[in-house]
Image: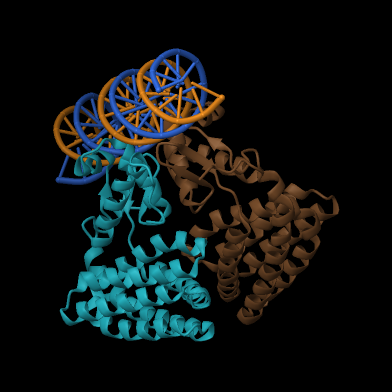
Chain colours: A brown, B cyan, C blue, D orange
Amino acid sequence: MEDGHLTIGGRHVPLRDQVLQALRVAIVNGDYPPGQRLTEDRLAADFGVSRNPVREALRVVEAEGFVVVLPRRGAVVATPTSSTIADMFAVRARLEPLAARQAAERATRDDVASLHAMLEEARKATDTQDFPRISRLNSALHLRVIEISGNRWLSSLATALYLHVQWVFRLGVAERAPHSWIEHIALVEAIGSGDPEEAESAALAHVSAASSAAHENARTGYSREAGSQRPHA
Amino acid sequence: MEDGHLTIGGRHVPLRDQVLQALRVAIVNGDYPPGQRLTEDRLAADFGVSRNPVREALRVVEAEGFVVVLPRRGAVVATPTSSTIADMFAVRARLEPLAARQAAERATRDDVASLHAMLEEARKATDTQDFPRISRLNSALHLRVIEISGNRWLSSLATALYLHVQWVFRLGVAERAPHSWIEHIALVEAIGSGDPEEAESAALAHVSAASSAAHENARTGYSREAGSQRPHA
DNA sequence: GAGGCTGAAACTGTATACGAAAGACAATGC
DNA sequence: GCATTGTCTTTCGTATACAGTTTCAGCCTC
């Protein structure tokens, strides 16, 4: 509620934000596959709104790297390549340890408890092989660590970053999940014990492992899915 | 030119992008000071366009952290605080060394030459005390390093990041400039000699020094300028 | 004189309308 | 048969219109 608005009208969520969320989810889930052309009229029709909210949402997903906009030609869903994926993990490998360190320095008892609760949920989801849920919990855990770190720049970068992670990870969750959650436990332990050094190295180890797995998935997964739908340029 | 469009029509720059650039510059230069309310009508009048391009530009500067948007209340220029500045430098301290490392690994002879040319220009600007120019060259150098690194994620984060750096640095350029450029020389040397380790530590040293200086400026500079213009919330 | 109420003004949120540019495709000329 | 040109459709780029909220000044009441 700390972020909530006090007035009833202030709770209003503009259409552009609803469209933004729906659009991001659709792209990450693959409903709009890489290379897919996104015309404003079609999106407006899909979401049942006018073009204006769609345009404003498009500017944001453009800035976040989910679509490429060509002047007077419209938007196209971006195609993750092995090089952009490598770039993303290189960045993540630097930011994630920072988040873990600052989280270890600042975490309260309640913060740590919330992380443990998420681990427990993830264990259940892993038992039932609920992969979409595992994927969401994965992002949620990392976002929570960043929230605990209290670093606002990390927070603002995190939304786009973890949606991209989910994007390239989607196809490989099944094999990766068990290892991933073992690493998460180590990370949470380090944060819980307030050990910045240990938290940092646990985070780095986790990202490194995730990176290797992601590259495998990208090679085997997207090349098939993206196919010839890439924009001509 | 590698980014330029080949057709004459493809060279068209949408109003939203022109507004976006003008708006960022106006905020960073302090023409719209922190706390200033930005109504869409007024911006539209200032730039001589309708509200729509303004709205789309606002969504981007919002995502970049230059303004805070309150639902049904409009946009307000963000106020850099010492905590957000610290956060920014913590992030920068992780990303800049990465950029330097990758640049050292990939720089061609021409790349290094372009960096040296910038150092030379900066030396002249320092001699003539042309502070706005120094400030712009500072950002340009770092952006060039990131470009050389070839990491697209770094590139997309860089625009917003260095505009923020310029923002908080504006008031303290005079004192900081000489030290800054000495550190830059070390950085360029390391990249030029293709030594990733050395480049990384030079970058880290540079950011650390910049961070200390920025905190001083924030304390002495913004508290005066921002004054009571902050939004009531 | 202070505090609450009321109405108007200002502003955002959203939709619609119109003009211009780019691409597709058929018709025409060689 | 192939290249070329002209038209037509699609889609973006921009402006304008309107409805719902918030804000604020002025008035009324106590």
Q: Is residue A228 left or right of residue B193?
A: right
Quarter of the image containing the N terminus of chain B?
Answer: bottom left
Would you say B92 lies left or right of A203 here? left
On the question of residue B146 being in view, the answer is yes
Measured from the top left, where is residue A215 in percent x and y? Answer: 69, 61
Question: For this view, does A82 lie left or right of residue B224?
Answer: right
Residue A48 on image: x %, y %: 52, 26
Residue A207, quarter of picture: bottom right
Residue A84 sits above or below residue B224 on the image = above
Q: Quadrant of residue B85?
A: bottom left
Q: Quadrant of residue A117?
A: bottom right
Q: Residue reaching furthest right?
A: A127
Closer to the camera in the image, B231 or B84: B84
Q: Is A159 placed above or below A44 here?
A: below
Identify which residue is drawn at 30% across, 41% down: B15
Q: Is residue A107 visible?
A: no
